[in-house]
């Protein structure tokens, strides 16, 4: 545990009330661990597990791993055990974690908004092929996620990653999770400010740092100066959002306390102006508040969003300024909404006259061969590299104008489309029951099948409609903020059998609108009936909308019967 900067007296001076019962807030004197997670972190800084992986576990094998490391500290190295095959969703919450464990690992490789060189992408492809049975998913946190990784192979994987400037450190755990950045940072014509230098400095100073390795829970960061809000700032713990000041020019607003899962909350906009060279210090201030004042007693209340909700914007800003930054922040209006979609799909001219190309795999699922092929094409066409997006997509940057058409055609041959259908462009899915121990239903393949079906049923959709498919309530694919959000659960079909299905959220969004999806009472859809249900609701929208009305706006006033879909569908009613 790092030395605490603040005592109960300091807290009293800033008018922070002491809770009637301890919530495990260090700054208020509650330093004794209140649950097994906190005890594990106190027993040993999770960063120390790296050496045990390198010098003990990788040499002695899976059975040598201390359970406290396996199901706890390994996360700080980007490693989770994956789900044992053959365990159905009904057993997810009934079995102990060790009963769900396979002897293989999911590995998250963080990119932190960096431009990936052809060499880096080729290294990712080779690692996938050689050590992960070809698996690779682009996540909505700009990670590459692998599966089937064996503990014996981890040191070589790390060595290959480090050779191209990549790592897995603190990709999971109660730590500074991978940062989201704009995939078009430094090249977009309409960019307000390039946040890359700030992210690089935050990572240099605070990642793999014991002072910031023990938060109450995960801590998610977004830094983007693009007006599309392409770093999903609304749902991050801390977000720096590009903004203009009338006197001082481009800088960043500060948003805090966003997060989804079972208690979704949008980030609060503090309405400030921060110059780029002060962003790392402000990040450290917010992170320190979370470390020192965050709730550690209950894991279910341990995210920053709960502290922000209890304190309010004024108190949070006061503590940040007075106790951590020791200076006032300059007030400035916050951006109201995104100016355009933030997925960057398609061909766009850069400010230097070259072009970037936004590409859509199917729900982020790629593989080692595809990544290797992408690296070959980047080299062949002289592109600068690629970045991953917050929407399970990727963007190729630095393409000469006379090379664009040929490169787009060649990229499509390896499975990356620059002109995808709405359904391929606008559908995301989490890992699901295939590999995830928390999942209840299958997601990746189900979402891919849904895309293929809707491309046949509704091929000429004239407006964007997003579909986010989640395997459990944790909302890793943001089910509450999609036009059609699907939260996996077990439901009853028309014959009373328990089957895979989804709770439906309708009309949510972030970016151009910020709204949680509407839930219909006792309305759930079976996985088997999903294609019919989505088609029916979208056709109802197309028939009932007013001119220029978006799907999300239509949901706000549509008759509930139109949202429930055809009664002949397999809809479970409780």
Image (cartoon, rainbow, N blue to C red):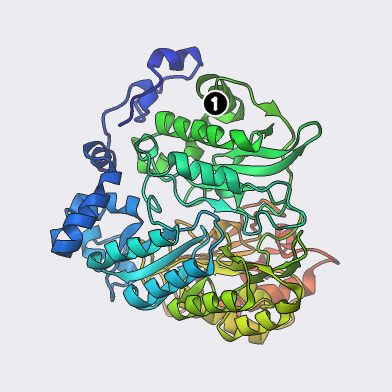
What residue is shown at x 24% (from left), y 38% (from top)?
39
Where's the N terminus, which quadrant?
Answer: top left
438 relative position to 330: left or right: left
Residue 45 found in image quarter: top left
Residue 467 found in image quarter: bottom right
77 relative position to 383: left or right: left
In this rendering, does residue 116 appear at all? Answer: yes
297 relative position to 205: left or right: left
Q: Is residue 180 above or below residue 415?
A: above
In this view, which residue lies farthest toward the right? Answer: 547
Query: Which residue is at the front of the view, 44 or 98?
Result: 44
What x and y, as percent, mark residue 214? 35, 39
Query: Which residue is at the front of the view, 559 or 121?
Result: 121
Instruction: Give the residue number, with chain letter if any, for mark 1.
Output: 320
Secondary structure beneath label 1: helix
Q: Is residue 47 above or below residue 154?
A: above
What x and y, as percent, mark residue 123? 43, 70
What residue is shown at x 53% (from left), y 82% (from top)?
449
């Amino acid at each position: 545990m790092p030395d605490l900067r603040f005592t109960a007296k300091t807290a009293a001076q800033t008018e922070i009330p002491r809770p009637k019962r301890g919530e495990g807030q260090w700054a208020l004197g509650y330093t004794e661990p209140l649950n097994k997670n906190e005890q594990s972190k106190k027993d040993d800084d999770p960063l120390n597990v790296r050496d045990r992986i390198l010098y003990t576990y990788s040499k002695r094998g899976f059975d040598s791993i201390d359970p406290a490391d396996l199901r706890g500290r390994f996360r700080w190295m980007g490693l989770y055990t994956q789900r044992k095959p053959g365990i159905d969703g009904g057993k997810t919450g009934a079995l102990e974690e060790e009963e769900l464990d396979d002897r293989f690992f999911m590995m998250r490789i963080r990119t932190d908004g960096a431009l990936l060189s052809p060499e880096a992408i080729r290294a990712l492809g080779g690692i996938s092929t050689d050590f992960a049975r070809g698996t690779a998913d682009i996540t909505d946190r700009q990670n590459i996620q692998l599966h089937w990784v064996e503990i014996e192979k981890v040191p070589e994987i790390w060595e290959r990653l480090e050779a191209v400037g990549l790592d897995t450190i603190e990709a999971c755990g109660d730590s500074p999770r991978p940062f989201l950045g704009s995939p078009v940072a430094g090249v977009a014509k309409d960019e307000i400010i390039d946040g890359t230098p700030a992210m690089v400095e935050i990572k240099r100073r605070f990642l793999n740092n014991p002072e910031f390795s023990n938060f109450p829970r995960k801590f998610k960061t977004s830094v983007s100066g693009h007006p599309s809000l392409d770093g999903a700032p609304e749902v991050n713990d801390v977000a720096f959002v590009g903004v203009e000041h009338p006197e001082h020019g481009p800088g960043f607003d500060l948003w805090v306390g966003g997060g989804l899962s079972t208690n979704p909350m949008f980030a609060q906009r503090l309405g400030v102006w921060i110059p780029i060279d002060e962003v790392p210090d402000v990040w450290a201030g917010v992170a320190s508040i979370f470390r020192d004042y965050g709730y550690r007693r209950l894991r279910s209340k341990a995210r920053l969003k709960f502290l922000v909700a209890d304190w309010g914007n004024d108190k949070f800003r006061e503590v940040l300024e007075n106790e951590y930054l020791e200076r006032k922040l300059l007030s400035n209006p916050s951006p109201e909404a995104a100016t355009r979609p933030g997925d960057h799909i398609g061909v766009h001219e850069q400010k230097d006259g070259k072009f970037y190309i936004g590409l859509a795999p199917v729900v982020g699922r790629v593989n080692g061969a595809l990544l290797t092929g992408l690296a070959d094409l980047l080299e062949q066409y002289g592109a600068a590299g690629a970045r991953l997006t917050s929407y399970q997509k990727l963007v190729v940057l630095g393409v000469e104008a006379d090379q664009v058409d040929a490169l787009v055609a060649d990229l499509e041959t390896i499975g990356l489309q620059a002109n995808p259908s709405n359904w391929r462009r606008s559908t995301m899915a989490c890992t699901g029951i295939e590999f995830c121990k928390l999942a209840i239903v299958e997601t990746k393949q189900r979402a891919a099948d849904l895309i293929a079906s809707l491309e046949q049923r509704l091929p000429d959709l004239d407006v964007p409609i997003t579909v986010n498919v989640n395997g459990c309530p944790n909302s890793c694919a943001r089910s509450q903020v999609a036009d059609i959000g699907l939260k996996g659960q077990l439901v009853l079909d028309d014959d009373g059998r328990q089957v895979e299905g989804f709770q439906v959220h309708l009309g949510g969004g972030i970016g151009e609108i910020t709204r949680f999806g509407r839930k219909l009472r006792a309305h759930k859809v079976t996985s088997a009936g999903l294609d019919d249900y989505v088609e029916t609701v979208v056709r109802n929208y197309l028939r009932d909308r007013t001119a220029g009305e978006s799907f999300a706006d239509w949901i706000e006033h549509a008759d509930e019967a139109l949202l429930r879909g055809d009664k002949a569908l397999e809809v479970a009613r409780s």
